[in-house]
Image: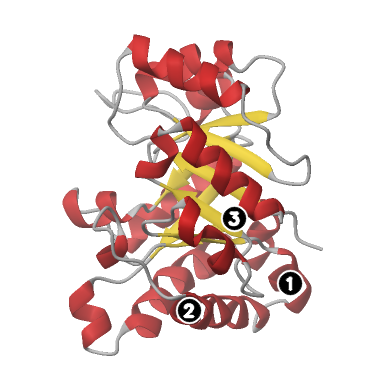
């Protein structure tokens, strides 16, 4: 049985004071033991959040890593090895904002995925289509292409140490949410694509849904057979809301 997971992507938000308060408030939340919880603060705040969550069963990850796994002359970048050294266990790769706003290609995302794993980090591979692509009935084609690049480069065995998140771009930060049926359709296709390479790995990989997940819609989304939890954006900045989402995943 796949363990439910809820991941909170804090994006480029917070001051040291507000982030410390948020992390402290998360410690007061009643989160089911069977739900794996991770938060992804900005790189500047990783050490602070790790300190606040010491002794708690909430993991800390980074929102991105460099293509280069080690050290070198890459001004402004942070490598997977540096993130691992800082105490991170997880990293997001291929978030739609990095693909669309910052121009990351499928190739770059795949390289980051492999760099993360080479340093012992667990990547959450983000996949998703734009509204224009969905309206053109290209959702499964786009998501399939994004996933195929990583399967081809890293090998299907790599997904034994990874999580996949489907996040329709049109539903991120817009208040719009894919219906449970729409999300399940894509999750089914993702698992089938993985199964074509290895059925056992496909059955064990956790697939998260991301895109305006809130306490009010979480239970219905997480009730779908191939949705194993959520990658939460704005709602993860509110401890009570995030805690409610975690409890929904445990129900």
Residue 243 position in % (x across, y down): 57, 38
| Left or right side of 42 for 60 | right
- For this orientation, the residue located farthest to the right is 1
What residue is pinned by disc 1? 203
Under circle 1, the secondary element is helix
Q: Nearer the viewer, residue 137 or 30?
A: 30
Residue 60: horizontal and vertical position, in percent? 56, 29
Instruction: Name the quadrant of the C terminus.
Output: bottom right
Residue at the disc numbered 2: 186
Q: Whole-Å distance between the Cαs marked 1 and 2?
A: 15 Å
State the image coordinates of residue 20 (x, y, percent, origin top left): 44, 13
How packed is label 1: few (under 14 Cα within 10 Å), some, or many (20 or more)? some
Pointer 1 or 2: first along the chain = 2
- The answer to which quarter of the image holds residue 68 is top left
Q: Position of residue 145 (x, y in %)?
A: 39, 76
Of circles 1 and 2, which is in front?
Answer: 2
At a point 38% along the width and 59% down the height, the residue shown is 211
Q: Is 25 or 142 nearer to us in this picture?
A: 25
Residue at the spot x=22%, y=85% of the render? 135
Count of numbered badges drawn on the protein: 3
Residue at image position (56%, 26%) is 26
How far apart marks 2 and 3 lie (CA) works out to 15 Å
Q: Which residue is mark 3?
A: 163
């Amino acid at each position: 049985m796949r363990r439910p997971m809820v991941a909170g992507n804090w994006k480029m938000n917070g001051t040291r004071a507000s982030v410390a308060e948020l992390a402290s408030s998360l410690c007061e939340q009643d989160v089911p033991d069977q739900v794996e919880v991770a938060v992804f603060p900005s790189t500047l705040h990783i050490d602070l959040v790790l300190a606040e969550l010491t002794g708690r069963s909430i993991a800390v990850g980074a929102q991105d890593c460099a293509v280069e796994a080690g050290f070198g002359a890459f001004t402004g970048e942070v490598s997977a090895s540096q993130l691992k050294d800082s105490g991170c266990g997880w990293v997001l790769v291929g978030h739609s904002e990095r693909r669309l706003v910052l121009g990351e290609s499928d190739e770059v995302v795949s390289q980051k995925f492999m760099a993360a794993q080479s340093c012992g980090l667990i990547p959450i591979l983000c996949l998703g289509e734009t509204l224009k692509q969905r309206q053109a009935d290209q959702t499964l084609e786009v998501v399939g292409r994004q996933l195929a690049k990583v399967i081809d480069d890293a090998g299907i065995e790599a997904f034994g140490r990874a999580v996949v998140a489907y996040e329709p771009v049109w539903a991120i930060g817009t208040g719009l949410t894919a219906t449970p049926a729409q999300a399940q359709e894509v999750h089914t296709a993702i698992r089938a694509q993985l199964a074509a390479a290895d059925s056992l790995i496909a059955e064990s990989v956790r697939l998260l849904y991301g895109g305006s997940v809130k306490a009010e819609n979480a239970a219905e989304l997480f009730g779908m057979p191939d949705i194993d939890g959520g990658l939460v954006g704005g709602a993860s900045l509110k401890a009570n809301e995030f805690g409610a989402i975690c409890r929904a995943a445990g129900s």
